[in-house]
Image (spheres, rainbow, N blue to C red):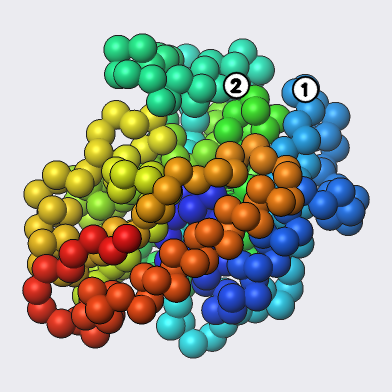
């Protein structure tokens, strides 16, 4: 299981091996008693901007991923591997990113859906994808591929989801790599993984930093859950490139080894929604589509590994 931002949180849900974890997150989202049980650390709670969403995100991760759920992820069988994507931000001038940088990065996120010519992509930054993985062999460890452990688990999910400014301050690297083994982390912060890596297929193939990881995570068949109602596979949340026509991706879809599952309708709940009725209506509509998908002959053929093209499933 792998993903960035909300997709990383969802992948972590699935990695626990129980559907109860998924339901736990949806039914409790927005409940005021959860942030009271898992309050923000002072370095976030006392800093501007104070974000209601951040309070709920921080608490929800820790509520949904309590000890029982973490035991499911970090079990001894090694049969499930979870990869979470985050983005490391460094200023090119060597200074530690501050509030003005959060504003600039928020501007990048806020204009992500605009046409390419109107997008705001600030210069002056090194923006690197960093992957955190369970069961990671020592030979794959690097500055950009790091272990996901019980100790950094909650913070890695939070960093992967964290849109700067909209969700308050970014996460310092010490929470993600406590040993401080990466010198370039010293003047960096970690934010939303979707900034640099949302759909990893092309980057894993093209970027030498991730090719060994790609070989390690290769599977006979892959399912992508994409929230775009048109099934567009945006490489990053900045929407600079879609991967549907990428040769490797297109070939895998045609060969029946890659299945793209996406909503057959616009998703009602926004990522800032706190309305329980809207949230659960969105969940139930998705679950109903999931039932239809599992009953479809094309899905049965895909899961069985039968050869041939897998047609889209409505």
Which residue has dot 2 on it? Answer: 102
Which residue has dot 1 on it? Answer: 48
Percent coordinates x, y for residue 313 in the rendering: 28, 63
For label 1, count other residues whose C-alpha is less than 10 Å away and answer few (under 14), some (14-19) or many (20+).
few
Q: Find residue 65 and report its image quarter.
A: bottom right
Which residue corresponds to the image point at 82% horizontal and 43% vertical from the top-left? 41
On screen, residue 80 above or below 28: below
Task: Describe residue 304's horizontal placement relative to residue 135 as left or right.
Answer: left
Q: Which comes sooner in the sequence, label 2 or label 1?
A: 1
Find the distance from the CA under tag 2 to the CA under tag 1.
Answer: 11 Å
Quadrant of the drawing holding the N terminus: bottom left
Which residue corresponds to the image point at 13% horizontal and 53% vertical from the top-left? 250
Percent coordinates x, y for residue 38 in the rendering: 84, 53
Q: Find residue 269 and report its image quarter.
A: top right
On screen, residue 304 above or below 234: below
Q: Find residue 46 and report its image quarter.
A: top right
Task: Work out which residue is located at the far bottom of the displayed protein and give it.
Answer: 77
Which residue corresponds to the image point at 44% horizontal and 64% vertical from the top-left? 289
Quadrant of the drawing holding the C terminus: bottom left
Depth check, front residue: 103 or 207: 103
Task: Describe residue 301's horizontal placement relative to residue 21 as left or right.
Answer: left
On screen, residue 179 above or below 161: below
Task: Describe residue 297's horizontal placement relative to residue 261 as left or right.
Answer: left
């Amino acid at each position: 299981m792998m993903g960035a931002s909300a997709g990383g949180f969802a992948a972590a849900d699935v990695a626990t091996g129980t559907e109860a974890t998924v339901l736990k997150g949806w039914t409790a989202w927005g409940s005021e008693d959860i942030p009271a049980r898992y309050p923000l650390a002072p370095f976030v709670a006392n800093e501007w901007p104070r974000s209601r969403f951040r309070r709920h995100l921080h608490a929800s991760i820790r509520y949904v991923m309590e000890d029982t759920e973490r035991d499911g992820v970090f079990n001894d069988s090694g049969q499930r591997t979870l990869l979470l994507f985050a983005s490391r931000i460094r200023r090119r001038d060597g200074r530690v990113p501050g509030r003005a940088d959060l504003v600039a990065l928020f501007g990048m996120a806020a204009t992500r859906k605009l046409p390419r010519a109107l997008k705001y992509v600030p210069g002056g930054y090194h923006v690197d994808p960093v992957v955190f993985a369970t069961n990671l062999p020592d030979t794959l460890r690097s500055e950009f591929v790091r272990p996901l452990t019980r100790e950094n688990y909650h913070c890695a999910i939070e960093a992967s989801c964290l849109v700067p400014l909209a969700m308050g301050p970014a996460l310092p690297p010490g929470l993600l790599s406590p040993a401080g083994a990466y010198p370039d982390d010293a003047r960096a912060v970690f934010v939303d993984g979707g900034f640099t890596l949302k759909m990893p297929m092309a980057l894993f193939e093209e970027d030498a930093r991730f090719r060994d990881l790609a070989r390690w995570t290769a599977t006979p068949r892959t399912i992508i859950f994409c929230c775009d109602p048109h099934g567009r596979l945006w490489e990053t949340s900045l929407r600079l490139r879609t991967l549907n026509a990428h040769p490797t991706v297109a070939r895998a879809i045609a060969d029946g080894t890659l299945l793209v599952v996406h909503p057959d309708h616009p998703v009602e709940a926004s990522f800032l929604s706190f309305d329980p009725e809207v949230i659960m209506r969105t969940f139930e509509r998705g679950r109903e589509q999931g039932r239809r998908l599992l009953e479809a002959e094309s899905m049965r053929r895909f899961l069985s590994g039968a050869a041939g093209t897998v047609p889209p499933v409505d």
